[in-house]
Image (spheres, rainbow, N blue to C red):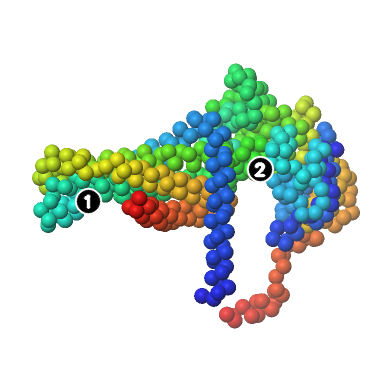
Amino acid sequence: MSNGKYNGYLREGVRRMGAVAIFFFRILIQCVPATGRPRLIVYQIFNAGARSLIIIMLAGLFVGMVLGLQGFELLQRFGSEETLGTAAALGLLRELGPVITALLFAGRAGTALTSEIGLMRATDQLTAMEIMAVDPLRYVAAPRFLGGVIAMPLLAAIFNIIGLFGAQLVGVQMMGIDRGSFWSQMQDSVEFRDVTEGVVKSLVFGVACSLIAVHEGYHSEPTAAGVGLATTRTVVASSVLTLLLDYVLTAVFIRG
Amino acid sequence: MVVDVRDVHYAIDKRPILSGIDLRVRRGLITAIMGPSGTGKTTLLKLITAQVTADRGQVVVLGRDVAQLKGSEIYALRKRMGMLFQNGALLTDMDVFENVAFPVREHTDLPDPLIRKLVFIKLQAVGLRGAAGLMPGELSGGMARRVALARAIVMDPEILIYDEPFVGLDPISLGVIMRLIKQMNEALGITSIVVSHDVQELSTIAHNSYLLSSGRVAAAGSPQELRKSDSEAVRQFITGSPDGPVPFHYPAPDYNTQLLTADEP
């Protein structure tokens, strides 16, 4: 690749990141007045959160069950299958819960947010608000952003609970690990900072995924193809950013 | 003068859209802005509503130069305007009643019973009080535009802007919208700007007309004066002739040469 082309891509990348950062600050400013209308935010928590519940619960159950099977098989080699509860809990709380919830959130709620706002742009609803002297950032973007940020940790918590149930189902019911050992080992080994790590991660992922979803919808081309493209960009960008942020946060927590 | 557009130039990606437009809208009158598609009519509305700023020239609305206004001042100016969009642009997550109530709830602290009365008065004016509980998806095109009109007048604006209000309407809905535009102007004294390419319809309601062609004002005057114009561009637009100053063919290479060389890859 020639230097000129490389510089062009770099410049475009920096420009886009700058645009998202400015958009983020504009939304943060509008979040303050948006909290004056809690009904809008509660509706968006329902929209992004409650409507993603089934997929989150199903995924949590299967991830937990796989974790139970793989964990049991691995721990059995060392004769320590009784610690399956600890392994499953730590894996879910610190890593799988927040990350998989964020990836599912990007695919389910993120795409819905982008296409909804994109269609509002395409059908002049956002322009109509501006002409009515109502800032669409305050009325449309901020409540959806806040709804996503609040919903993400709640969804991750539900994912973790169902995941633990799935691991227990496989480990205790199917593989015959002692129920008491499963739960007591978990209680002894899981610390508060493990829970904190998961909550912080899911909050950060909530900010990242909601910001990308709202930004892409808000700036989508007002055509059918434009909205489709924006929706795809939401999934790709949210997924990559989630995994990148996960590495950074994991490194920070392990060093800290 | 409610709107005064002076020598306005505007380009998108160096492609000129408006090239020295001069236009005046007088208080209390219906002013029609006509012209073929792509002549800059909608861009002109964007300039008047301060959605975009002119590259050169001046746009003065209600005594304020829109290019000099800051964010909050633009919003203050827009509170004195209403706009009817081509597709209605109703908020799809609210029913008809809430759509009309939306600007009132956003800009005033009026008690709920008063808002209800106000909304029902406006819906009655457009004949859709009975449709207050319907969602936008349940409305026909004409009904959606009438609801949007009720929303546009709910804050009692001084200027009402209509962007292609007649497009895609059946004759009955078209007649209703025309009657409403006239009624809003006569009963409420609202200054109206109607952007459209429907010559017949506009000539019956407009007091004053501007015909745009290639980003310039090709003719101005009453609809009757426009009909008598000798300008070729005006004649073509009014008679609907397929060829003329606005050519039928998009610029292309020589037809014969292109056919003869069509076999070459």
Q: Position of residue B226 (x, y in %)?
A: 86, 47
Q: What amino acid is found at the position of numbered circle 2 in the picture?
A: Gln
Give me the residue at 84% from left, 48% from top.
B6
Dot 2: element:
loop
> Which x, y percent locates residue B240?
77, 53
User: In front: B11, or B129?
Assistant: B11
Seen at 72% across and 67% down, the residue is B251
Please give the name of the residue rendered at 54% of the width and 76% of the height, measured from the top-left corner. A2
SS assignment at label 1: helix
**Residue picked out by circle 1:** A66
Quadrant of the rendered image containing residue B101: top right
Kindly indicate the quadrant of the structure image that contains residue A185: top left
Q: How many labels does the image show?
A: 2
**Viewed as shown, does residue A221 lie left or right of B195?**
left
Identify residue for label 2: B86
Q: Which residue lies furthest to the front in this view?
A: A256
Q: Give residue B131's position: percent from left, percent from top.
A: 57, 27
* Residue A251 place in picture, x, y as percent: 36, 55
